[in-house]
Amino acid sequence: MKPTLQDVADAVGVSRSTVSNAYSRPDQLSAALRTKILDAARRLGYSGPNPTARSLRRGFVGALGVLFTSELSYAFTDPFAVRFLAGVSRTAERHGTSLLLVPLPADRTRTRSVVEDAAVDGFCVYCVGDEDWALRVIRDRGLPYVTTAARPDAGPDDRYVGIDERAAARSVADHVAALGHRRVAVLGETVLPDAPAGPLRLADPGAAPHPTTRGRFTGFADAFAAVGVAWPAITVLNATANNRAAGAAAVASVLAGDDPPTAVLACSDVLALGVLDALAAAGPRLPRPVSVTGFDDIAEAAAAGLTTVRQPAEEKGRLAAALLLEPPAAPADGHLVLPTDLVVRTSTGPVPGS
Amino acid sequence: MKPTLQDVADAVGVSRSTVSNAYSRPDQLSAALRTKILDAARRLGYSGPNPTARSLRRGFVGALGVLFTSELSYAFTDPFAVRFLAGVSRTAERHGTSLLLVPLPADRTRTRSVVEDAAVDGFCVYCVGDEDWALRVIRDRGLPYVTTAARPDAGPDDRYVGIDERAAARSVADHVAALGHRRVAVLGETVLPDAPAGPLRLADPGAAPHPTTRGRFTGFADAFAAVGVAWPAITVLNATANNRAAGAAAVASVLAGDDPPTAVLACSDVLALGVLDALAAAGPRLPRPVSVTGFDDIAEAAAAGLTTVRQPAEEKGRLAAALLLEPPAAPADGHLVLPTDLVVRTSTGPVPGS
DNA sequence: TTGAAAGCGCTACCAT
DNA sequence: ATGGTAGCGCTTTCAA
C-alpha cells in the first residue's frame, strides 16, 4: 500500500495539517520540522500529496482541456491544428498548466463521455464539424471555454478567438475574380453531413451547416456576385475529410469532365494541395491550367507556391488559452478577431486566353 | 452553487447510491427510476458526477500523462515528435483515454512540480535530454511508465519502445563509408550539456551523456573504425537545439574552414536539413560537394532527397501507449525494439575525385 | 508554529 | 432493485 499523508504524520508524530503544510505552504512551519517531515516521507516512500485528492479538496485541477471534435489523431495530422496546439501549449507552459487532450468517441451514445469525465478547469475547443453536443456538455458542467470560431448558438458567456471568415475568403476570391475567372468551383470539407466526395447541390452558401465553411463560402460568393457570377453558377465540391487525399478525390470528377472550372477555391490548404496533386496527376489531359487557392498558409503552402489566406495559427492557440488562463486578457465581449492576409503565389494566374 | 449528487438524491427521494448507479451502472436500477433521476438532475442543473471526486474514490483517472523533457511546445514543433504523438493518441483514442501533456518547467526548483501534480494513471516519456529528474518523480509516485529509449538507470520494471540505435546508426554510416568518405563529421544535439554550437572535443562516443546520442555516435564510430578511421579523426559537431536552424549553425564554422569534411552524419533529420540549408547558403564557395545523412525519415526528408534511417514514428507512439494501456501487449521483458531501414536518397554520393 | 475538526463529492460494499 | 455506511486523501479554517 502506498503511504498516505497520514502515515507520514504518524511517523513524525505531527498532525496531517503540518505535513500538508510542509508540502504546500513551506512558510507555515519551521525549516527544521519541514526537513524532518520530508525526510520521513522519503524514508516511507511517500511521494507527496495525491493530486486527485488535492484537486478535490481545492476545487480546481490545474489543467486545461483541449477538445478536437474529430479523431484525436487529427490534432497531430493536420498541420494547422498542430500549430494551433503549439500556441496553446506555449501559454499553458507559461502558467505551469497541463493540457488534457480529450478524444471524442465516434460513439456518442456511450452513457458517459470523456468530456463529462475530464478533470479540467476549462476547455479550448478546436472547431471542426459537429461540436454542438460536446459544447453543451461543457456548458452544463459550468466550465469556462473558448472556441476557435463564433458559434451560431453563442451565449453571452461565450468566448472565441477567430478571424473574419467571410472577409478573409472574400479577399482571396476577389483576387481570383480579378484574374478573370468566372467558371469556378469552391471546395469544402463535409459541406453537408454524409455527403459523398465531389460535386454537390447547395442552395446557397448560408446552407452549409458548419459555421466556418459557411463563412468562407459566403465570402467566396460575395466576390463572385460582385462580378456578376451568381451562386448557382458556382460548382460546390465536397471533400470527405480535411486532408490532401480527400481534396484530390473531391475534384477528380470535375477535372475529368469536359468543361472543368478555371479556378478552384478551397477552404483549407491541405485540400488545395490535394487539388494540386489531382492537377498534376491529370496533367497533360487538361485543356488548360487551373488556378487554385487555399486557406491558412501552412508551411507546405509556400513550397507548393499556393496562393492562400494566411491566418495566425499559433497566435490563435496562444490567445485561446490566454483567454482562459489570463482573464484580464479577455476583452469585454470575450471575442478576439485576428487579422488575415492574402498571400499571392504561383498557383493562381489569369484565365487562359483572356 | 453547483448541485451535487446528494441534491439530486434528495430531490427524487432516493439515496446517493441510487443516483450514482443511474450514471455509472444503469443496469443496477429500473429504467423508470433512472429516467426519473436523470430528469430531476437536468432540472436541477446537475451535470453528472464530479470527475475529480469520482477519480479519488475509484482510484484511477482514465488519463495517460505524456512528458516531453523539453519545452512543451517542442512536442508540436518537431516533426518526429508530432508523429510520435499521433501514434500515442491513436491508442489513447481506442481506449477512451485522455492524454495529459505536462509541461516541464525550466525551473526545477519549484517546490512542487507539474509531474508530481499530474492526475494520471501512467506516463509516456518522450526522451530528449535530461529526463532523469522527472523519471525519478514518476517512479516515486509508483506510476507505470514507458520511455522511448532504454535508460542507463533502467530497473526491472522499466518498459520502453525503441530501436537499436547503434545498429541503425551504423547502417547509414556504413553506407557513407562505402562511398569512400573518410573525412567526416558527426552532428548531434546537446552532445555535452551547455556546449556551444560547432566543433567539440568528445573523448569517445560513449562519453555523450544522452543515451540516444551516445548510441548513434557509437554506431557511426563502429562503421568508420571498420574502414580504418578512428574516433579522434572524426569531427564532432554540436547543435544547441534539435531544429533546422541549429543544424545549420552547428556546421557553419567547419564549412567555412579550408578543409571541410566530405560527409556530415546527423543524429536527426531536422539537423540534417539544417546542414543542407548551410550547404546551400555556402554554395559555390565550397571546394566540393558534401554528403549529408539524417535520422528518422520525417516527411520533409523525402522532398529534400535526404539519405536517412527510417524509424517507425507513429508505431513507436502507438506501442508506447499500448504497453501501458494493454498490459498483455507488453512482452515479458517490457521492451519493444522496432525495426529501422536505411533510406538512400540523393544527399549522399561518392567522395569527389575518388 | 502546530493541531483538531470538518468536510470536498463520490462509489463500493453489504444489507435488505 | 434500493439504501446505509464508510471511507478515498487531502486542505483549510479556526483555535491553542
Image (cartoon, coloured by chain):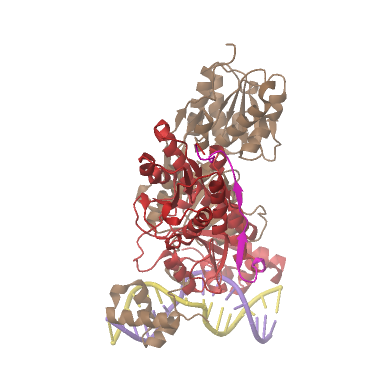
Chain colours: A brown, B red, C purple, D yellow
Q: Is residue B186 above or below residue A339?
A: below
Pick the residue in front: B253 or A109. Answer: B253
- In the image, is A324 to the left or to the right of A76? left
Residue B88 in picture, x, y percent from top left: 58, 57
Pick the residue in front: B16 or B347. Answer: B347
Asked if the stretch drawn in magenta spans residue A296, the answer is no
Asked if the stretch drawn in magenta spans residue B344, the answer is yes
Which residue lies at the image location 69% right of the left edge and 26% below the top edge?
A254
Task: Give the extent of the magenta segment.
Answer: B328-352
Q: Is residue A276 above or below residue B323?
A: above
Res. A45 in view: yes
Pick the residue in front: B138 or A100. Answer: B138
Residue A149 in picture, x, y percent from top left: 50, 41
- Count all numbered tags in the image, as a single digit: 0
Residue A5 in picture, x, y percent from top left: 43, 80
Residue A165 in picture, x, y percent from top left: 50, 33
Instruction: Give the farthest residue toward the top.
Output: A354
Res. A137 in view: no
Magenta stretch mostly in which secondary structure? Answer: loop
- In the image, is A317 to the left or to the right of B35? left
